[in-house]
Image: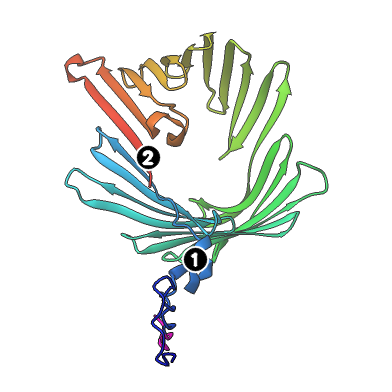
Amino acid sequence: MADQSPQSPNLSTPPPPPPPTLQSTTSEPPPPPTRSSLFPFLTSLNRPKLRVTSEFDSDSLLFLNKVSCKLFDNLAKLKLSFQNNSQREVTQPQLSLTSKYLSVLYDVEEKNTFIKSTVDVSPRLQLRALHNVNAQQGEVAMEANLAEPGYSLELSSPVPIGYPRATLKFPLGEVSIQEREEEEEEEEKNKRMLSINGILKRQVMDGVCSALYTDEELRLRYAYKDEALSFIPTISLPSNAASFAFKRRFSPSDKLSYWYKFDSNMWSAVYKRTYGKDYKFKAGYDSEVRLGWASLWVGDEAGKVKTTPMKMKVQFMLQVPQDDIKTSVLMFRVKKRWDI
């Protein structure tokens, strides 16, 4: 008789798989959105780079500091400037915002604002305006480029009170005409008259001849210059004050300059030698103040600080008075820039 009881499972048969686990109806909360997902436009904005420039002058014991940065994809520049004296006091703080068409300067100590604006109405017409908020004064100007290249006409006038000025610019110079008042002692009243100022330049032989007329004085100047020599005589009329400058370059790194005034017999001389681009030695004498001096520049004297090694310029100067050598003074000036 067969056994009807269930057969025992075979050991070689694998056990049945475990039952599937039930998925939880409550899942974990998603991670909080990042700042960039909340404000996508912030991902394209970077913090503006700060440019900090500090200059120390041992003669005045002042630190001249400037902090600036460019905003709105280099469309504007924000700058803060101030001074520190020997008592570490902050003086002359000024804040400015400069752009292509608008510039605003705020003087913190004076609590005054200076505004300058420029608008290009058309390719040949430009409007400019200056305004001093505290003084309630300013100037408006309009400049138009004429049909001929190099010619332009500018009309300007002080605001709110003043006489307008017209300036004609052309390739050889410019001439301006403005009405002004001149006091007459005999009649004790003001007399209106036209004031003419101007400058003319023209190539004559191998030099440039210029005539500058301002405040009823005419200054004639001729400048000859080549690769090795410069000669610049000057005379003023009606005072007949004459002077000349002579400059001689002995090599690309050596240069001697000399100035002489015939009316006062005063003269000055300067010798300059450069060592590469970043080192310059200068020595000179001025008979008017009876002072000899010598200076050494580390860093390009005329260049910007950002182009010099370590973004720093240093100047050492020794001044030796002719009448009292014992009072000689050694001064130095340091200018450094940091990009943060």
Closer mark to the observer between disc 2 and disc 1:
1
Q: Which quadrant of the rendered structure holds the N terminus?
A: bottom left
How many numbered discs sit on the rendered protein? Answer: 2
The residue closer to the viewer here, 90 or 163, is 90
Relative image position of residue 77 (x, y in whole percent): 48, 54
Identify which residue, 67 or 2, lies in the foreground.
2
Residue at left 40%, top 50%? 50
Q: Which mark is residue 42?
A: 1
Q: Residue furthest right?
A: 147
Q: Is residue 257 visible?
A: yes
Q: Residues within 10 Å of mark 2 (few under 14, many from 20)?
A: many
First along the sequence among labels 2 and 1: 1
Q: Is residue 320 left or right of residue 286?
A: left
In the image, taking residue 125 as reference, residue 55 lies left or right, namely left
Residue 286 part of the magenta-drawn span: no
Q: Secondary structure at mark 2?
A: strand
What residue is shown at x 30% (from left), y 31% (from top)? 333
- The secondary structure that most of the magenta stretch takes on is loop
**Local SS, label 1:** helix
Image coords of residue 73 (percent x, y):
55, 56
In the image, residue 110 sits, relative to residue 234, either above or below, namely below
Residue 317 on image: x %, y % = 30, 22
Range of magenta residues = 22-28
For label 2, the residue is: 337
Q: Residue at x 56, y 56 (%)?
A: 75
Q: Amino acid at mark 2?
A: Arg
Residue 280 point in image, percent of width and height: 41, 19
Q: Amino acid at mark 1?
A: Leu
* Residue 164 makes an appearance in the image: no
